[in-house]
Image: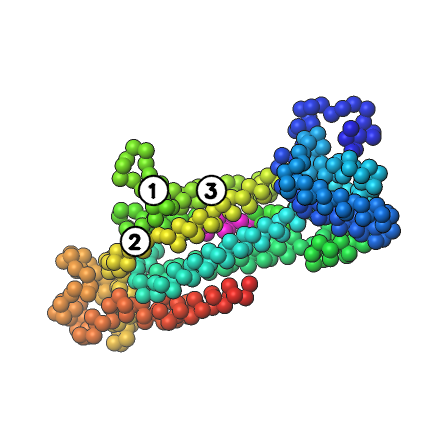
Amino acid sequence: MKLWGGRFSKNTDSEVNDFNSSIRFDQRMYRQDIKGSIAHAEMLGKCGIISMEDSLLIVKTLGEILADIEDGKVEFMIDAEDIHMNIETILIKRIGDAGKRLHTGRSRNDQVALDIRMYLKDEIINIKNMLISLENTLLTLAKEHTDTIMPGYTHLQKAQPITLAHHTMAYFEMFKRDIMRLDDCYERCNIMPLGSGALAGTTYPLDREFVAEKLGFKDVTLNSLDGVSDRDFVIELASALSIIIMHLSRYSEELILWNTNEFQFVEMDDSCSTGSSIMPQKKNPDVAELIRGKTGRVYGDLMSILTTMKGIPLAYNKDMQEDKECIFDAIDTVELCIPVFEKMIATMKINKDRMYNGAGGGFTNATDAADYLVKKGMPFREAHEVIGKMVIYAIESGKALSEFTMEEFKNCSTIIENDIYEAIDLKTCVEDRNIIGGPAKQAVMASIKKGEDFIVSL
Ligand code: ARG
């Protein structure tokens, strides 16, 4: 019989039974469910709502059930619907009446609201640690390449020279904000809902603060309707995960390009690539492509939860059971992607010569040539025009600006002197951009230092 079977005179239709059951996917919250029940039972005993003997027996038996689950000795039943009732059913089977007292002053609605918060808190910590590890790999890469000049792009057209360290630290900053977003989201999950009951609280004198403290929550929810029916923290995490995978995907896209025969800026290690079943020469950047591909499903998870929640009247409705598969899938996907992405970055070969040569083409020093004229007294708009003409001439004669003779420079502007060569050298172009956040070695080293301080502060 169902735990709620009292008012029913017929058995549930077997198809409806399967349809309702969430044990297939919510069994992963068994640890949180048991921990939550232990805290609840301790509180019931302490407050004299159940006897101390019953409380102790429940706590002890729940501990044994947890150990049995971890040893693979427990088989969950579809018939018991979800993880909450599966565990309660096992408990009652083991200790009878004492087990039947556990659910005093509690509803599955506040129970599931508790479990999901606890589960997300644990996973947020996991994901944060993965991001910290990735950030350390990026810092290592950046430190090795503060002198590795490469082209920076806008519109995927060569724009101005930067360094690989500068490019790498751009992603460091993005993942830094991702970590901060996870921290924020953690705060929102860190509020304890037990005591909300089904929707209207409870008549038992529960000590909610005691339970919150036992379970490591910072505070308790302040409205029982909200406590059981809000899932905005789930949506917030799905959103933070979407942003994380968007960053990974964008980075992947760049690496896929850099790994092409046309660019050859990097070469993916054999250990992180795959071959083709027909073309013997192929080595494909599948890891990066799969991450880019999986981004779609994480966005889908976010949209799915958002849409599920948008029309649900207060308080709990069964629709909300649909939040779990989405957020679990988003978590699993991101947890799958971050470590392989890190491995790919850590093992790829950097082709410094190709990067340097790439930075040399495409007139990436044209802005610096214009700035040179400005420093000699010409207004910037006029300098822009003079260098624009210079570029037309360079294209026609198939030369880079640095290959101009002095005479050719003088033809463009008589104020140009011999020091132009130094001024438009790629190294000068990078080193002169010594501004906070700029690509010059000193500026990048300062950002790296701040990045290291941030990671240490976590
Ligand atoms: N399995 C349910 C869920 O995930 C638990 C809460 C069920 N509450 C209820 N009144 N049917 O949402």
Residue 265's label in the rendered image is: 2
Q: Is 22 above or below relative to 383? A: above
Residue 399 location (% of width, % of height):
16, 59
For the residues labelled 3 and 1, the Cα–Cα distance comes to: 17 Å
At a point 84% along the width and 45% down the height, the residue shown is: 54
For the residues labelled 1 and 2, the Cα–Cα distance comes to: 15 Å
Q: Is mark 2 within 8 Å of ligand 1?
A: no
Residue 374 location (% of width, % of height):
28, 73
Label 2: few (<14), some (14–19) or many (≥20) C-alpha neighbours in 10 Å: many
Q: Is 322 above or below relative to 180? A: above
Residue 284's label in the rendered image is: 1
Residue stretch in magenta = 239-248
Label 1: few (<14), some (14–19) or many (≥20) C-alpha neighbours in 10 Å: some
Residue 354 vs residue 160, the one in the foreground:
354
What kind of residue is marked 3?
Lys
Could you tell me what secondary structure mostly forms the magenta stretch?
A: helix
Residue 243 vs residue 138, the one in the foreground:
138
What kind of residue is marked 1?
Asn
Q: Is 76 above or below relative to 298? A: above
Q: Is 397 left or right of 238, judged from the image as shown?
A: left
